[in-house]
Image: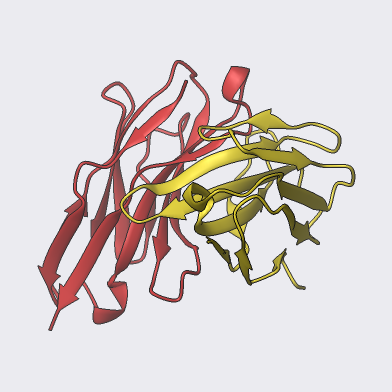
Amino acid sequence: AQTVTQSQPEMSVQEAETVTLSCTYDTSESNYYLFWYKQPPSRQMILVIRQEAYKQQNATENRFSVNFQKAAKSFSLKISDSQLGDTAMYFCAFMGAGGTSYGKLTFGQGTILTVHP
Amino acid sequence: NAGVTQTPKFRVLKTGQSMTLLCAQDMNHEYMYWYRQDPGMGLRLIHYSVGEGTTAKGEVPDGYNVSRLKKQNFLLGLESAAPSQTSVYFCASSYYYGTGNTEAFFGQGTRLTVV
């Protein structure tokens, strides 16, 4: 069974600084997707970034980038030049793309990020 | 384009009552999901479906049933509500096209209170 673990319940960062959120996962599949979603106080779930397991290059989206270590089953999110609007709950998620976890989307426990002015 | 729509947005139930939450998506997605979100627990998968007529159990399926009779709809049923089912429920839909990109789209959530 696939599992996703976020070991940091809360993190804080000063505006304009850089912060890294950690995520590890466990799976026996070789083909899958990984995601970071953001949930602000409005409760809306917003896709931040995604990574396809068969792509070795780390994904980037503007100020957001990931460090994908497939062998270590690690998928961390780096937020550069943090902004007050980045304050939210961040979820790491795993979607199987084959085998028994085909289509199954599993989330971690979440990390509350607070950006201070 | 409405995306993913959940009905209702709020509901209060008495212990033992039954209800059905409706999720509708207009993006022709194959995959649909029901999650519950509780403080400190993240999003926990209740049931999911990888296509019309199919359903599968997630992490916390007990006390819930689902049906996917039409591709665009995914229903979550509580046959006999319990206070432990007080939560915020999210529906999501997704797609997967071979080696292309994929992502999940979420509804706005349903806050359910069982008293």
At horizontal 49% and vertical 63% (from top left) the residue drawn is A45
Residue A8 appears at what percent x and percent y?
19, 48
Q: Nearer the viewer, residue B102 or B29?
A: B29
Query: Chain B appears what colour?
Result: yellow
- Residue in view at x 18 percent, y 74 percent: A115
Residue most extreme to the right: B70
Q: Position of residue A40 (x, y in %)?
A: 39, 71
User: From the image, which quarter does the C terminus of chain A lie in?
Assistant: bottom left
Vertical placement of residue A109 versus B22, above or below: above
**Viewed as shown, does residue B82 lie left or right of A41?**
right
**Residue nearest the viewer, comparing A72 with A62:** A72
Residue A53 can be seen, yes or no: yes
Q: Colour of chain A?
A: red
Please give the name of the residue rendered at 28% of the width and 40% of the height, measured from the top-left corner.
A23
Q: Against A83, is A50 above or below?
A: above
Q: Residue furthest bottom?
A: A117
Query: How many marks can you see?
Result: 0
Residue B64 in the image, given as x and y percentages of width and height: 65, 40
